Image (cartoon, rainbow, N blue to C red):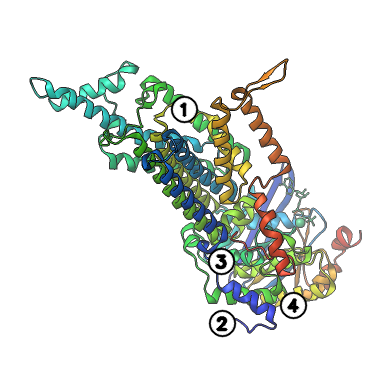
Amino acid sequence: MSALLEVAGVSVSFDGFRAINNLSFEIEEAELRAIIGPNGAGKTTFMDIVTGKTRPNVGKVTWGPNNISLLKRSEAEIARLGIGRKFQRPTVFEDQSVFDNLLMALKKPRNPFAAMLYRRDEDDIARIRALAEEIGLTGALMRRSGELSHGQKQWLEIGMLLAQDPKLLLVDEPAAGMTVGEREHTTRLLRETARTRAVIVVEHDMEFVRQLGCRVTVLHEGSVLAEGSLDYVTNDARVIDVYLGR
Amino acid sequence: MATPPTNPTMSERGRSLVRHRSFLAQPSTIVVMLLLIAFTVSIVSLSEAAGGDISTSLVKTLGKTMCLCLIAVAMDLVWGYCGILSLGHFAFFGLGGYMVGMWIMYARTEAIVVEAARNAPLPPTPQEIRDAIGTQIFGVVGGSDIPPIWAFAHSLPLQLILVVLVPGLLALVFGWLAFRSRVTGVYLSILTQAMTLALSLYLFQNDSGLRGNNGLSGLQNIPGFEEVPQSVVSVAFFVASAVALGAGYLLAAWIVSGKFGSVIRGIRDDEPRVRFLGYQVEHYKLFVFTLTAIIAGIAGALYYPQAGIVNPAEIAPIASIYLAVWVAIGGRGRLYGAIIGAAFVSLLSTWFTGGRAPDIHLGFYTIQWVDWWQVLLGVAFVLVTLFAPKGIGGLVDLLVRPKRQASAGQPAPREAAE
Ligand SMILES: Nc1ncnc2c1ncn2[C@@H]1O[C@H](COP(=O)(O)OP(=O)(O)OP(=O)(O)O)[C@@H](O)[C@H]1O
Ligand SMILES: [Mg+2]
């Protein structure tokens, strides 16, 4: 069985600065993976590459059983292939209601004519209600999402990610600004989701990563420094040196 | 059905979700439509044609204002909702005018030529008629041949198709090139200005085939209706403009009320985020840009027969900038705001520049509104942008929202379709 996503020998430079340096990475179809690394290690840039926002200078990014290359595809095409993303800074459509945010994310035909002729049906509403329940925003469905707290926006974005029903979820710092209870909830949600699909979580918080109980990849200066269980990588001398020792 | 609600408030909210409020049921749509109908009926019944006191020229002014309101609705759709600050939509408006003007000029000249030849000893050949028409229309620019772009000018249906096709295709090609290379923001605005400037400069040339700076004139004389007095023609165009405005408004309201509206407002607020949800942003922008160009073309086709003349100066870059100013002053992102802005500012402009506003004598200087109106408008635009970004339409919130909030007993749940 081949990997769902394969990144091989990828490098990216910004004005001569190598943000990603000969990075290789793989994830299986139903796998939960945490990526950790110091600030500026290239974690977000890695997600930018996979989602088509940043084009690598060299390397390969291939997807799915047919190993199609993602390098030539637009952000929207990549999203439609089944790669969903939650941003580091919560980005929801603040001017619109929670319901409309979720509706926009809901997996449906994405072309203009389909959107124009779309009529909400019972199934979609039920699905959105269930999602809202899951992310604790049932009572806020008709509120303008700009009025939500930081943590609630994080939740809404997670809800939008789930609504897309992607095969791979890229989750950038989901727990930032969340209470302990909310973190536990997030952990549970991510682990549950990873039973049927691939989930990559970027997180700084070691305790959160420990709760995920998954394989960990340590990034440093744009390449993989170590990979394995959390205990394994945290005992690695180089990892302690660059990341934990500080 | 969905999971059973756990408490009464949730079930209420739940039901309000299920029943998606149609755009037709929105208070703003209903109010706008009723006002439009009431206004149209009263002007028609008070018009000269119906024996009333409203002069033909005022009916024409009001009819033209309706057309300006229609293009303002289009501008609001493309800018206020989709975030594309096009400063070129008046080019599409002008093109619509040219397309209908070609038929009016051709058919009218043809009628005159045929009429004049009636007394001739020999009936003229079709070629002679064509030559005579060519000389009549293009004599002012020193030509007599009918240019190829006038190939369909003899036919009203064909020229009406061109009213839609020419602005639509220009917008489609321009938009495709611009959006595909992800030109956005101020660069796109500049590009649209360049487009309208180029078009107007081209039309200024005598060999453009559209009579250079003379433009097309005599458009108030509709072929086949020479016997009908202008008082009646003006009412007919006034009503047609009102119907077009109503239809355009309903179309725009429908578009922005559903998921498509959600997506384009998403594009306006955070374009990359919409892409990462899997929406092909370019397609949405292209659709909105082209559709609004077509609406602008139709508005122009109704406007210029009421104005009587269309010339390249109408397409000057400044016209499209005014359009943005109207929408900003009226309040962008709400369709009735566009109508308020266009009607208010353009009527005020007619009043000020028509020489009817009293000059202000300061002793050392006399403010003549014909000159100073532009300054006043500029200042108003800056003030609105800085201090009242919701424009005049924002006043409606002050009237409506607090009441709703009080009755809800909590922060008003703003429905997204508004
Ligand atoms: N568009 C860009 N232009 C120039 N430099 C960039 C750009 N994007 C990222 N970088 C640089 O690349 C490096 C990696 O950034 P990245 O955001 O991927 O780090 P990160 O691991 O996500 O860090 P953090 O933990 O702070 O989120 C940083 O030094 C950053 O300044
Ligand atoms: Mg980051």
Q: Quadrant of ligand 2?
A: bottom right
Letter of the chain that mark 3 sits on in the rendering? A
Instruction: Please name the residue that numbered disc 3 is placed on.
Output: A64
Q: Position of residue B165 (x, y in %)?
A: 37, 42
Please tell me which residue lies in front, A171 or B98: B98
Q: Amino acid at mark 2?
A: Met
Question: Which of disc 3 and disc 4 is earlier in sequence?
Answer: 3
Q: Residues under labels 2 and 1: Cα distance?
A: 59 Å
In percent of width and height, residue B131 lies at 21, 22
Q: x%, y% of residue A167? A: 60, 69
- State the residue in front, A221 or B82: B82
Q: Say what secondary structure mark 1 lies in.
A: helix
Q: Is residue B49 left or right of residue B314?
A: left
Residue A30 shows in the view: no
For label 2, the residue is B1
Residue positioned 78% across, 63% down in the render: A150
The Cα–Cα distance between marks 4 and 3, rounded to whole angstroms, is: 26 Å
Q: Amino acid at mark 4?
A: Arg
Q: How many C-alpha atoms fall within 10 Å of the one at disc 4: few (<14), some, or many (≥20)? A: some
Marks 2,1: beta carbons within 8 A: no
Is residue A83 visible in the rendered image? The answer is yes
| Mark 4–mark 2 CB contact (< 8 Å) | no
Q: Position of residue B53 (x, y in %)?
A: 44, 38
Whole-Å distance between the Cαs marked 3 and 1? 52 Å
Q: Nearer the viewer, mark 3 or mark 1?
A: 1
* Residue B200 numbered mark, or none: 1
Which residue lies under the disc numbered 4?
A: A188
Is disc 1 in the same subunit as disc 4?
Answer: no
The chain identifier of the residue carrying mark 4 reads: A
Secondary structure of the residue carrying tag 3 is loop
Disc 2 residue: CB within 8 Å of ligand 2? no
